[in-house]
Amino acid sequence: MYPSQALAECIIDSLIAGGIRDFVYCPGSRNAPFAYALARYEALSESPIRVHIRLDERSAAFFALGLTLGQGSGSPAARACVITTSGSAVTHLYPAISEAFYSRLPLVAISADRPAELHGVGASQTMAQKGIFSDHIGGEWDFSSDSAELASVPGRVARALAAAAGHPSGTPGPIHLNCAFRDPLTPSDEAEASNSAQLRENRDGGAEIYPSQIVREPSAEAVVKSDLATVVIAGHGAQDSVLRWAERSRVPVFAEPMVTGVSSEVLIPFQQTLCADSDVVARIGQIVVTGRPTLSRPIQKLLASDKRVIVVSPYAAWTDLHGMACCVVSSLTQSDRVDAAIQSSLCEDLFARAQSVARGVDELINSYGDELSEIGVLDALWHDCSHIFLGASNPVRVADLIAGRHGYDPQGNSESDHRAPQQVWSSRGLAGIDGNVSTALGWARALEKAYECPQTVHAVMGDLTFLHDASGMGMPLGEEFPRCRVIVLDDQGGSIFKSLEHGQRASKAVYERYFGVAQRVDITVLAQAYGAKIHRVSSMPELRAILNTEADGLEVLQLSISRPTKDIAFLRSL
């Protein structure tokens, strides 16, 4: 076996032994040894892996990122990787790697590289790839096709996967394997590779990774002051243990829309609106923060105030934007107690205030009747859909304004006709619109294996977000689309900036040219060209009828709506 093929075979074998099951492969020449290594697994009658071929490296990386979402927050082990050729192809992975880094997702990125002797001499498709992702990965491992290094590959890959899972640093995240291949880049004999003894041994995986180390032990003394009215602020990646503590302790929870599973007995909806109310803020004396709350400016203002802030984080890079935390612990303990009377009174007041806001939300939604609106669409999704992907622009913010209005009750009762989302995702690591279509499709593919019954991912995003990653719909012949319904809220350009300072300061002409940037593309024709099924939706009843069915592969729904700027301002003022 030629040295480059031997290295590729060993790396793929070691990755599978370490638990990687999904490989997203981008066609190229320098990374071709990986193609042959993957093909031998695909040829098995019961292959332990799935290979996804993608043309665009940026979309491929976000697709791999989406594949990691099917594991749920309780499993930090890496399960998916993306493989590219050398040169500029590697740079296209950076957006997804950055998102994975700040979302603490164990994405594995593998790049082929030219050997050392071809660097610095003007060789084609050659650039400095070592250290290219610098501070946005949990580690980088360089491999060469020198035969003397082959024996160390399994151990080094095991260490790499341990780092991706957060061992021993405590923080999971993306890693980079850079593999220098020398010619020839093909096997000496394809039949030779398929007879590898390690192939059969690694089919079930199960390689050991290094045990986790607790970064910070919680204090033996209580960190929660029992005489202060306490709330929990739950952001992206909130710890379930903190949410259960809040439920037991009757501590109200302000949760971003991506945080699901909060008990209705303590979930307080409309966090943006309530935390902008000075009377509500005055009632709060202590805040327990879990996850990474970055969505709401009123929440950030509250965290920057004089309240007592406790951050609960298992990660070394905890979230404390304003440096106001009085302490940071990895978990709460049984000694962390609150006063039942104080908490009961606080819950009653917040629920009463939430009910008042709910009436205003109802009036706004009802005022549209059957007409489409962004707030009505998000409300329908929240009521009818199990797996929701929110575009990282207006959709996630509108969802934050209305999520939870169904099914909550001060007595903990829930509406019998309401099916709350099981899981909600938005790329909040960097909060960018980059790769949103690809991430949603990757998540949908992961759900195919995670559930016996068909599950549809409903991805709602603006027209610019959709067009930014339209190439993510590219699918090679022989692969079927997963069940994914992309709902495009077409308001003719970017409206997110209208609700920010630019909407107040820029003239209409400047705003539309530099911030709105409406496009000429026919969305439905574009989506149809990629093979998606198309729906032009013109009313809320038509949308609800579609939402109550499972998607047939990839469906793109185009909804022409007005910009929601006034609705957002109204909801924040309630």
Image: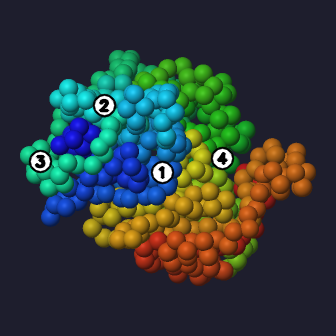
230 and 128: which one is in front?
128
Q: Is residue 433 left or right of residue 131?
A: right
Residue 272, which numbered label?
A: 4
> Residue 522 sits in which quadrant?
bottom right
Q: Earlier in the sequence, mark 2 or mark 4?
A: 2
The percent position of residue 389, horizontal first and vertical second, equals: 51, 58
On screen, 519 above or below 298? Answer: below
Mark 4 / mark 1, whichever is N-terminal: 1
Q: Nearer the viewer, residue 8 or 450?
A: 8
Q: Earlier in the sequence, mark 3 or mark 2?
A: 2
Neighbourhood count class around disc 4 (C-alpha, 10 Å): few under 14, some 14–19, many 20 upward: many
Q: Looking at the image, which residue is at 49% across and 41% down?
A: 125
Q: Could you tell which of marks 1 and 2 lies nearer the N-terminus?
A: 1
Task: Report which residue position mark 1 lands on.
Answer: 57
Tell me the SS state at disc 1. helix
Residue type (three-letter) at the residue carrying disc 1: Glu
Q: Amino acid at mark 3?
A: Ser
**Mark 3 lies on residue:** 196
* Cα–Cα span, label 4 and label 1: 37 Å
Image point (82%, 46%), residue name: 502
Q: Nearer the viewer, residue 294 or 78?
A: 78
Q: How far, Cα to Cα, is label 3 from label 1?
A: 30 Å
Inter-mark Cα distance, 3 to 2: 20 Å
Residue at point 40% right, 36% down? Answer: 114
How much space separates mark 3 and mark 4, taking CA atoms?
58 Å
Q: Is residue 521 left or right of residue 119?
A: right
State the residue position of label 2: 144
Location of residue 439 in the rendering, given as x and y in whole percent from the top left corner: 48, 55
Front of the two marks 1 and 2: 2
Of tags 3 and 4, the one toward the viewer is 3
